[in-house]
Image (spheres, rainbow, N blue to C red):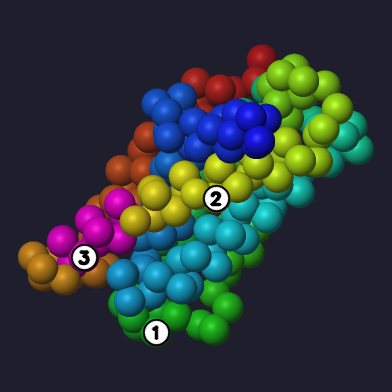
Amino acid sequence: MQDFNLYFRLGTEHILTWEALDHILFVTALCLRYLLPDWKKVIVLVTAFTIGHSLTLALTALGYIHFAKTWIEFLIPLTIAATAINNLTQKSETVKHPASLPLIYFFALFFGMIHGMAYASTFLSLEGKEGLVAHLFAFNLGIEVAQLMVVVVVLLMSFIFVQLLKISRLWWMRILSILILSVSLKMAVGRIPS
């Protein structure tokens, strides 16, 4: 149980620290088009991200796939930028009445796969491959819980600004997406592989 707690805590810390700003920005960008009544859709969306993240984290940790960490670290802010740009291209009708399976779900899954590759080497340096499956499970569960905490904050902010203060839902999403896009592009420039 001690190992479970350790890796669960590592998973939550992987998301809820200043060093994880890129992860927080990505989850925020994913959730901006949703409001509190859409909470089930958001859980599916964030879980799709966790599945992608978990899959490549496991495959990379087990040595089945390998990409240069510098390229992965460069691609992560580009996934954030792409999600923010997708938000900026949404029309009012699409935001109010999204398709039954919007493109954002595929973004979450695919971009989660990119994010998952970034942490594998650090994860393996903690313990090698012994007990890897149980530790990966605890770690990914910690990630999911932490992401849901970020989602709650984003949905509460959306509730305050869109539903209480009556800011246009589309403008709310666009303003925050522009801010996220700016920060992610600055991150990407700082991470260009040499």
Q: CA distance from mark 2 to mark 1?
A: 26 Å
**Residues shaded magenta:** 153-162
- Whole-percent x, y for residue 54 in the image: 70, 47
Asked if residue 166 is positioned above or below residue 2 in the image, the reply reads: below
Asked if residue 156 is positioned above or below residue 135 in the image, the reply reads: below
Amino acid type assigned to the residue bearing label 3 in the image: Phe
Residue 159 has which mark? 3
Count residues near mark 2 (Cα–Cα under 10 Å), then give few for <14, some for 14-19, many for 20+. Answer: many
Nearer the observer, disc 2 or disc 1? 2
Q: Earlier in the sequence, mark 3 or mark 1?
A: 1
Nearer the observer, disc 3 or disc 1? 3
Q: Is residue 118 visible?
A: no
Asked if residue 54 is positioned above or below residue 108 in the image, the reply reads: above
Lateral position of residue 105 relative to residue 64, left or right: left
Amino acid type assigned to the residue bearing label 1 in the image: His
Q: Secondary structure at mark 2?
A: helix
Q: CA distance from mark 3 to mark 2?
A: 22 Å
Which residue is identified by label 2?
144
Q: Earlier in the sequence, mark 2 or mark 1?
A: 1
Q: Quadrant of the image for the N terminus?
A: top right
Callout 3–callout 1 Cβ contact below 8 Å: no
Which residue is identified by label 1?
97
Q: Residue at point 38% right, 35% down?
A: 183
Q: Is residue 51 visible?
A: yes
Nearer the observer, disc 3 or disc 2? 2
